[in-house]
Image (cartoon, coloured by chain):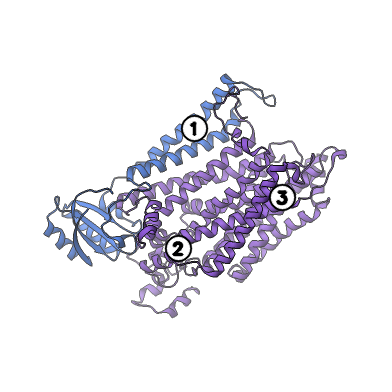
């Protein structure tokens, strides 16, 4: 089991609007948010948290380009250098006929590369047991957590209470 | 997403005043309860049919392709028909999950999970046929380009049949990634309700998902790019399948209309299969609030449009054959409609072009009963279409001395029926282990698509059940 070993103070909300308000408030008070857990992707969350845009799609482009090159250069090498064969009187280097496989490998590499990257950078794999603050955050509750070493506990608690948290607790994960 | 009133012209996507917790409850519980008797019975039937299919596959491998009705003239018949049919069915899943995501069609959330599952299972069924047809199944890996001791001798990258290998394996694996990535948060929802061994299994399946904000952000980014990749991919797959025919020099196959015509037909048959499954699933699992009549109507509209496109393609083919002035082409089409297999052409026209026209009538589009029967019709019609293209064309080739007739043997029919058994076995297992409707995505659209948030209902502070029905008439 993975452990962060941090002492957290957290609030549980029953509505994403309250959560977003709380996040905005914390941001305006320059409080460091440890993490937010929600049952679904909440619209406007990235902006409220000030998350930088994910660079995953750039990685996807690189993997895709790798696939294009692998397929096209591979077929070129095979049919012009390694074992040239004439098919139906066409030239050895018959580029139009390479297009379908080049396209398919582009998609294949981009999709697999991105997906594997996604799970790796998120630390998600079969058998990984990531610590969870509250099991209801995959159901209908929204959790906002502060690291007590970064944020004063009483400040955090009053913010959570004022913004309408149903429950306020502390936990070490 | 919220903070205002959703326009009353919007139709609800989720009925029944659901809360987030109720959504979790409704969609997780089918995986938690023990199966009903109806499920067990249906599962036994599906597995038995699958077992018979496996027996027929073993029979084919043992005795060889001679166990089939295919002959020297008609080398491609039943199995390639089935292959194209299944691949086509798969296309609707990707269309719903990817293309409708890019077009921001929110109604897709009710059906995308099951449709994607259908895609994956249909592709598995499809891939079986060419693999068996090669005859020596045990050396089927010769398809793949790998360094070998025979040269290396590579496969022919200029051949549409090899493009097919790449297209279908890419399609299968990318669809699987897309589907599974969508499932991960929902498996976490099940895990957090479970205990003991079940919890362990679902923790593994959910990859330790927690729902952290950064993860969700990346998850959305990944889903969007996978949708963007899947969109041209799904169009390429049936295009390449049509190249198997279109790049040949057989009259009736050698036509440039094939790629768009095959893709439209694929979407058509795929939506029909989605309807068949959804009509049964929503009833059996009690999901009428999530897979609503609205969804069924939307899909029937797609069936109407694509069925009509397919009809236009049939007529275009006939016109071009006549207009080309090429007697072999003219004969091929005359033979299709009036030759020995006239009945399959008739079946195709009746099921694919004429029968979907009843969906111009709103009452029929919204009728579950009509939808179910129509979906079966369309699937039969699309099977006939592939049979018409493949078998009738080959039966009358250039040389009258080699003209022949094809009828399937029991072994071929057994394999086909077996794949239907395989498809339903996999689908039924899926309904037991995974939420059939994407939980997180439904919660995401609840405040724009939930019936309590729509139009004037949302203006009244509270609402009772009687308002639910009135929403339909907006």
Identify the secondary structure beneath mark 3. Answer: helix
Residues beneath discs 3 and 2 located on the same chain: yes
Disc 1 chain ID: A
Q: Is residue B280 above or below residue B325?
A: below
Left or right of B263, for residue A57: left
Residues beneath discs 3 and 1 located on the same chain: no
- Residue B322's image quarter? top right
The residue that disc 1 covers is: A68
Q: Is residue A146 above or below residue B464?
A: above
Q: Position of residue A110 (x, y in %)?
A: 45, 39
> Along the line of sight, which residue is nearer the eye, A124 or B232?
A124
In the image, the chain rendered in purple is: B
> Please, which residue is most extreme toward the right here?
B401
- Residue B50's image quarter? bottom right
> Along the line of sight, which residue is nearer the eye, A77 or A23?
A77
Residues beneath discs 1 and 2 located on the same chain: no
Alpha-carbon span between mark 1 and mark 2 = 41 Å
Identify the secondary structure beneath mark 2. Answer: helix
The residue that disc 2 covers is: B31
Q: Position of residue B284 (x, y in %)?
A: 53, 68
> Along the line of sight, which residue is nearer the eye, B100 or B414?
B414
Comes first in the chain, label 3 or label 2:
2
Left or right of B447, for residue A144: left
Between marks 1 and 2 in the image, the one whose residue lies nearer the viewer = 2
Alpha-carbon span between mark 3 and mark 1 = 39 Å
Disc 2 chain ID: B
In the image, the chain rendered in blue is: A
Q: Which mark is residue B412?
A: 3
């Amino acid at each position: 089991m993975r452990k962060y070993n941090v002492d957290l103070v957290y609030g549980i909300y029953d509505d994403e609007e309250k959560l977003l308000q709380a996040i905005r408030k914390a941001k305006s008070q320059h409080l460091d948010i440890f993490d937010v857990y929600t049952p679904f992707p909440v619209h406007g969350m990235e902006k409220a948290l000030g998350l930088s845009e994910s660079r995953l799609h750039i990685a996807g482009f690189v993997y895709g380009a790798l696939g294009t090159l692998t397929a096209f250069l591979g077929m070129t090498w095979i049919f012009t250098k390694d074992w040239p064969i004439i098919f139906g009187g066409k030239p050895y280097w018959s580029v139009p006929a390479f297009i379908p496989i080049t396209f398919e490998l582009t998609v294949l590499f981009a999709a697999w590369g991105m997906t594997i990257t996604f799970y790796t950078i998120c630390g998600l794999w079969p058998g990984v047991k990531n610590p969870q603050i509250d099991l209801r955050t995959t159901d209908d509750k929204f959790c906002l957590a502060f690291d007590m070493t970064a944020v004063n506990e009483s400040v955090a608690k009053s913010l959570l209470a004022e913004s309408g948290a149903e429950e306020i607790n502390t936990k070490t994960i | 997403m919220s903070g205002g009133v959703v326009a009353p012209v919007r139709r609800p996507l989720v009925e029944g005043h659901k809360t987030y917790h109720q959504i979790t409850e409704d969609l997780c519980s089918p995986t938690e309860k023990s199966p009903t008797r109806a499920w067990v019975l249906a599962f036994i039937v599906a597995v038995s049919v699958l077992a018979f299919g496996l027996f027929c596959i073993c029979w084919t491998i043992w005795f060889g392709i001679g166990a089939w009705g295919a002959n020297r003239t008609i080398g491609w018949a039943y199995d390639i028909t089935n292959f194209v049919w299944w691949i086509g069915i798969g296309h609707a899943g990707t269309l719903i999950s990817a293309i409708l995501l890019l077009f921001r069609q929110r109604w897709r959330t009710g059906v995308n999970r099951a449709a994607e599952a259908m895609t994956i299972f249909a592709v598995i069924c499809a891939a079986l046929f060419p693999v068996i047809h090669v005859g020596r199944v045990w050396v089927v890996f010769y398809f793949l380009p790998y360094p070998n001791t025979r040269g290396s001798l590579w496969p022919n990258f200029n051949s549409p049949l090899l493009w097919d290998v790449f297209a279908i394996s890419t399609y299968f694996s990318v669809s699987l990634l897309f589907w599974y990535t969508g499932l991960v948060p929902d498996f976490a929802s099940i895990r957090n309700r479970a205990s003991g061994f079940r919890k362990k299994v679902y923790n593994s399946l959910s990859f330790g998902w927690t729902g952290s904000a950064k993860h969700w952000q990346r998850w959305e980014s990944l889903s969007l790019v996978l949708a963007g990749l899947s969109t041209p991919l799904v169009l390429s797959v049936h295009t390449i399948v049509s190249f198997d025919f279109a790049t040949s020099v057989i009259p009736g196959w050698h036509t440039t209309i094939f790629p768009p015509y095959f893709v439209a037909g694929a979407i058509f048959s795929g939506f029909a299969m989605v309807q068949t499954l959804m009509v049964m699933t929503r009833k059996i699992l009690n999901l009428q609030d999530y897979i609503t009549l609205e969804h069924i109507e939307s899909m029937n509209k797609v069936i109407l449009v694509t069925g009509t496109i397919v009809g236009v393609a049939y007529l275009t083919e006939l016109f071009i054959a006549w207009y080309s002035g090429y007697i072999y082409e003219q004969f091929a089409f005359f033979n299709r409609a009036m030759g020995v297999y006239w009945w399959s052409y008739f079946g195709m026209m009746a099921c694919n072009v004429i029968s979907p026209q009843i969906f111009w009538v709103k009452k029929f589009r919204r009728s579950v009963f009509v939808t179910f029967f129509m979906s079966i019709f369309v699937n039969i019609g699309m099977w006939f279409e592939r049979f018409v293209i493949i078998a009738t064309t080959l039966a009358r080739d250039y040389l009258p001395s080699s003209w022949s007739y094809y009828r399937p043997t029991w072994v071929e029919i057994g394999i086909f029926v077996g794949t239907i058994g395989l498809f339903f076995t996999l689908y039924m297992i899926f309904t037991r282990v995974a939420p059939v409707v994407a939980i997180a995505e439904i919660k995401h659209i609840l405040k724009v698509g939930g019936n309590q948030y729509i139009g004037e209902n949302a203006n009244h502070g509270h609402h009772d059940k009687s308002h639910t029905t009135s929403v339909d008439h907006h």
